[in-house]
């Protein structure tokens, strides 16, 4: 007789929370088998949470081992399908909308936004990338995507790179044409990007925000609920001041700040392999700690990374052992932060409207 039953194991798994919603595991318990002291559990994880698959598998195994110390535990994580519900009045089907922002230009915000999107996509999520930096759209360049978007059935068909639907003003106006829009025109451009683009069904819409001002953030937050903002900064103290301003701006318009990414954190010299902290070290991490903002990770200064950006081949960074671990860690850490938030505030089940 085994010391535990299938039912007991299922009950025990129900004490764990789903990383996407924070709700107790229920339908995600796909299969449990008990044979002697062998305990095998198949637990579902949505594509939204796939970047943290390994840590979730570990959490499930640790939990079962502590609840059933005599068991020989095997945990398999399988995909659990949960469709996205339409967001806001625009009806965008996305589970999270993340604004990537910086206090000023040139800190690598677009590089970070693109890397985040590719990292999430490679980890199994469905991702869209929106270039809302209408003053200096760099997405077409960074992703090596040229041309003008077309329409079908009244919707704009986004460009696609690395399996990611992309939208940018750069696909609507001829290259090099200065975009000098202000106020209402900006608002309508962003509305068009979000509402009139055929994004399909997304786990994440990553938005590359224009640097500085809060206009676009406000426009966006009137259109749909933004999950939060990720702020990119460089390690210099002056850059940190800009990042703190950006944090303040998002907080003022009630958009949660999800985390901080430090770009150009150090430089590994290709000649001698030594690491140099050209712009200093640790300031962003310390600020994040003090202000209780998650530190999502860092990206070192890398000549190949810059070259791949110029060549429109950002995806290749994920095959570079010197860079990939940093970029993968940022995507993972963002999802872990969202999972921690969901666990602290579980999403309520939407009951069907009766009557
Ligand atoms: P922003 O969006 O903040 O204006 P970009 O992402 O367009 O900045 O980056 C500006 C330039 O800096 C680009 O040429 C980009 O390739 C380069 N760059 C960004 N991050 C790094 C890095 N970690 N190492 C080397 N070059 C970088």
Image: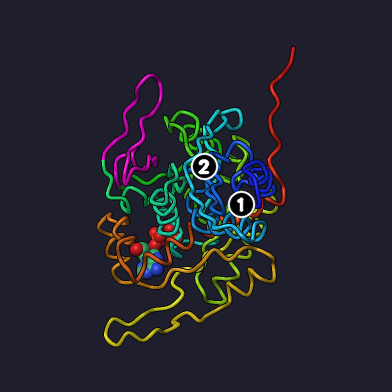
Is residue 329 at least partly visible in the picture? yes
Residue 95 is situated, as x and y percent measured from the top left of the image, at 55, 39
Left or right of 308: which side holds 338? right
Left or right of 193: which side holds 30? right
| Position above or below: 176 against 197 | below
Label 2 neighbour load within 10 Å: few <14, some 14-19, many 20+:
many
Q: Residue at x 46, y 33 (%)?
A: 201
Determine if the magenta segment contains residue 173. Answer: yes
Q: Residue at x 31, y 29 (%)?
A: 150
Q: Which mark is residue 331?
A: none
| Position above or below: 276 against 135 | below
Label 1 neighbour load within 10 Å: few <14, some 14-19, many 20+:
many
Sequence-first tag of 1 and 2: 2
Element at label 2? loop
Which residues lie in the magenta part? 147-175
Residue 45 is situated, as x and y percent measured from the top left of the image, at 52, 44
Farthest-out residue, front: 1
Q: Are marks 1 and 2 in contact (CB under 8 Å)?
A: no
Could you say which is closer to the camera, residue 183 or residue 339? 339
Element at label 1? helix
Could you say which is closer to the camera, residue 74 or residue 343? 74
State the separation of the CA atoms marked 1 and 2: 12 Å
Could you say which is closer to the camera, residue 104 or residue 18? 18
Left or right of 269: which side holds 262? right
Ligand 1's quadrant: bottom left
Residue 27 is situated, as x and y percent measured from the top left of the image, at 60, 36
Q: Which mark is residue 339?
A: 1
Q: Which mark is residue 46?
A: 2
Determine if the magenta segment contains residue 150. Answer: yes
The quadrant where residue 24 appears: top right
């Amino acid at each position: 007789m085994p010391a535990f039953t299938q039912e007991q194991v299922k009950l025990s798994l129900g004490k764990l929370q789903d990383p996407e919603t924070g709700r107790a595991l229920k339908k995600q318990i796909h299969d449990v088998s008990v044979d002697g002291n062998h305990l095998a559990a198949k637990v579902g994880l949505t594509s939204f949470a796939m970047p943290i698959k390994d840590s979730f598998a570990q959490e499930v195994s640790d939990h079962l081992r502590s609840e059933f110390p005599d068991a020989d535990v095997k945990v398999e994580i399988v995909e659990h399908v949960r469709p996205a519900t339409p967001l806001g009045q625009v009806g965008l089907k996305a589970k999270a909308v993340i604004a990537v922002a910086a206090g000023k230009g040139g800190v690598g915000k677009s590089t970070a936004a693109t890397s985040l999107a590719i990292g999430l996509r490679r980890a199994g999520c469905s991702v869209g990338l929106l270039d809302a930096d209408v003053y200096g759209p760099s997405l077409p360049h960074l992703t090596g995507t040229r041309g003008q978007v077309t329409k079908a059935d009244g919707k704009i068909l986004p460009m696609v790179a690395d399996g990611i639907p992309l939208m940018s003003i750069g696909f609507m106006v001829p290259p090099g044409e200065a975009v000098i829009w202000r106020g209402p025109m900006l608002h309508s451009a962003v509305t068009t990007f979000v509402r009139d683009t055929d994004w399909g069904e997304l786990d994440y819409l990553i938005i590359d925000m224009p640097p500085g001002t809060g206009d676009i953030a406000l426009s966006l937050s009137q259109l749909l609920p933004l999950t939060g903002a990720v702020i990119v900064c460089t390690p210099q103290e002056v850059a940190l001041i800009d990042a703190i301003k950006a944090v303040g701006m998002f907080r003022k318009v009630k958009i949660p700040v999800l985390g901080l990414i430090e770009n150009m954190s150090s430089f590994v010299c290709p000649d001698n392999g030594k690491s140099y902290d050209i712009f200093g070290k640790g300031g962003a991490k310390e600020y994040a700690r003090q202000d209780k903002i998650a530190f999502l990770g860092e990206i070192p200064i890398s000549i190949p990374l810059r070259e791949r950006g110029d060549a429109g081949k950002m995806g290749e960074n994920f095959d570079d052992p010197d860079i990939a671990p940093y970029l993968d860690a940022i995507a993972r850490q963002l999802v872990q932060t969202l999972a921690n938030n969901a666990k602290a505030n579980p999403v309520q089940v939407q009951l069907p409207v009766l009557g």
